[in-house]
Image (cartoon, rainbow, N blue to C red):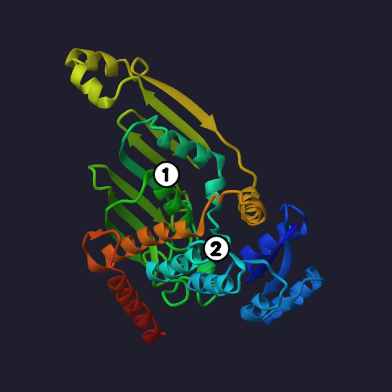
């Protein structure tokens, strides 16, 4: 195999973007093997735009056509795991869009099935893991440069979406069609990065508002408190109604601190001693002198790094990494099995809100699914 023939399932905004990148030659070792969509209008569009690419309105037919070596699932979230399993059954490599699914029970099914097919590539589209900024932040944390994490804070509220966004299609911002709101649509990348860099919490308590500032039934405002089980805590805040939003990620350790502003600038402050060592050795007079001076320059060193990103580059990197794993075994940036962690955290945030109490991770899958099904049923009855 010289090039991976990719089947694109769903040729909407995201699938169309990937098709454009590939057809323009921007993705190494990948070509469009086939396109699948259930919308008849998309067939006419693809006939004009990609005249030599086979088009299907049934993805099983596409999988069995012999035209594709791999697929990417740019479809509603409930279908990601199901389509991935059907591809792997037929020895076709699978790249799932985020999130891997709506609930952990269905994600666990594809993880377990993929484990029986070790010769196939199973990946998830966490393009932010290719972001040099977040790779650097993870490297600093993993190297122990800021010591043991004591606190994480991420406020990511620059997802402003007007009502017109939600009115684009009937499945959007519904329990039955999308499985949630900002937690499953806009914020999965940040939820993944949070656990990828800082680890999974042990407990979650949340305050979630549903249809708070938009005419929708799912969540548009989230505040979650994370308990890592070792004394460390975290706060995750996100919403879709702040016109002037914030993207600020802070990780505080006992040897320093990392602050990420707007996913572009990283400020790393490294203490010369751990906070515990300073606490044990510093007199109150020393402390007064230090902070009356207006800074911590005598006890810490600061480094500022700025990163620029090109639109689409990260998505291209994921597609190329996926192909490279298929062709020569290059390690995956985001193995498909990693997708369950972000789903588990989102499920915990939802469930804490639904039950009105703190929940432990992993959450009870049956309890979560029962509560989700109640939301879906109530939604049907109100239509």
Query: In the rendering, which numbered label is found on residue 97?
Result: 2
Rendering coords of residue 175 (x, y %): 41, 74
Rendering coords of residue 168 (x, y %): 56, 72
Q: CA distance from mark 2 to mark 1?
A: 20 Å
Can the viewer see residue 102?
A: no
Q: Is residue 303 left or right of residue 64?
A: left
| Of the image marks 2 and 1, the number of the one nearer the N terminus | 2
Quadrant showing the C terminus: bottom left
At horizontal 67% and vertical 67% (from top left) the residue drawn is 69
At horizontal 22% and vertical 65% (from top left) the residue drawn is 356
Secondary element at image label 2: loop
Rendering coords of residue 54 (x, y %): 76, 75
Q: Nearer the viewer, residue 273 or 260?
A: 273
* Number of numbered callouts drawn: 2
Q: Is residue 204 left or right of residue 332?
A: left
Secondary element at image label 1: helix
Query: In the rendering, which numbered label is found on residue 197?
Result: 1
Badge 1: how crowded within 10 Å, few (<14), some, or many (20+)?
Answer: some
- Check the image and report above or below for 374 versus 327: below
């Amino acid at each position: 195999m010289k090039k991976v023939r990719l089947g694109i399932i769903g040729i909407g905004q995201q699938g169309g973007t990937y098709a454009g990148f590939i057809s323009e030659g921007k993705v190494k070792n990948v070509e469009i093997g086939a396109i699948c969509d259930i919308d008849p209008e998309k067939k006419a569009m693809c006939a004009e735009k990609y005249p030599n690419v086979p088009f299907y309105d049934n993805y099983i037919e596409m999988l069995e056509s012999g035209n594709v070596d791999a697929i990417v699932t740019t479809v509603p979230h409930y279908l990601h795991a199901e389509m991935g399993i059907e591809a792997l059954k037929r020895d076709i490599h699978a790249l799932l869009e985020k999130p891997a699914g709506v609930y952990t029970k269905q994600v666990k099914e594809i993880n377990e099935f993929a484990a029986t097919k070790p010769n196939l590539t199973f990946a998830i589209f966490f393009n932010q893991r290719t972001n040099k900024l977040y790779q650097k932040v993870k490297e600093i944390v993993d190297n122990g440069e800021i010591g043991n994490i004591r606190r994480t804070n991420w406020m990511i509220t620059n997802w402003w979406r007007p009502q017109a966004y939600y009115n684009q299609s009937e499945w959007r911002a519904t329990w039955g069609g999308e499985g949630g709101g900002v937690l499953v649509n806009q914020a999965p990348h940040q939820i993944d990065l949070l656990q990828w860099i800082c680890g999974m919490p042990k407990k979650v308590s949340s305050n979630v508002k549903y249809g708070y500032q938009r005419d929708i039934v799912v969540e548009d405002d989230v505040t979650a408190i994370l308990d890592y089980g070792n004394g460390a805590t975290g706060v995750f805040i996100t919403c879709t109604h702040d016109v002037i939003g914030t993207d600020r990620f802070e990780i505080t350790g006992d040897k320093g601190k990392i602050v990420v502003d707007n996913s572009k600038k990283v400020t790393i402050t490294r203490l010369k001693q751990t906070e515990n060592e300073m606490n044990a050795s510093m007199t109150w007079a020393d402390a007064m002198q230090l902070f009356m001076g207006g800074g911590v320059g005598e006890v810490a060193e600061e480094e500022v790094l700025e990163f620029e990103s090109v639109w689409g580059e990260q998505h291209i990197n994921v597609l190329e990494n996926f192909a490279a794993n298929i062709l020569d075994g290059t390690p995956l940036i985001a193995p498909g099995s990693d997708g369950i962690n972000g789903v588990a955290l989102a499920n915990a945030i939802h469930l804490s809100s639904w039950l009105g109490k703190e929940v432990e991770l992993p959450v009870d899958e049956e309890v979560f699914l029962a509560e989700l099904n109640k939301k879906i049923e109530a939604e049907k009855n109100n239509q």
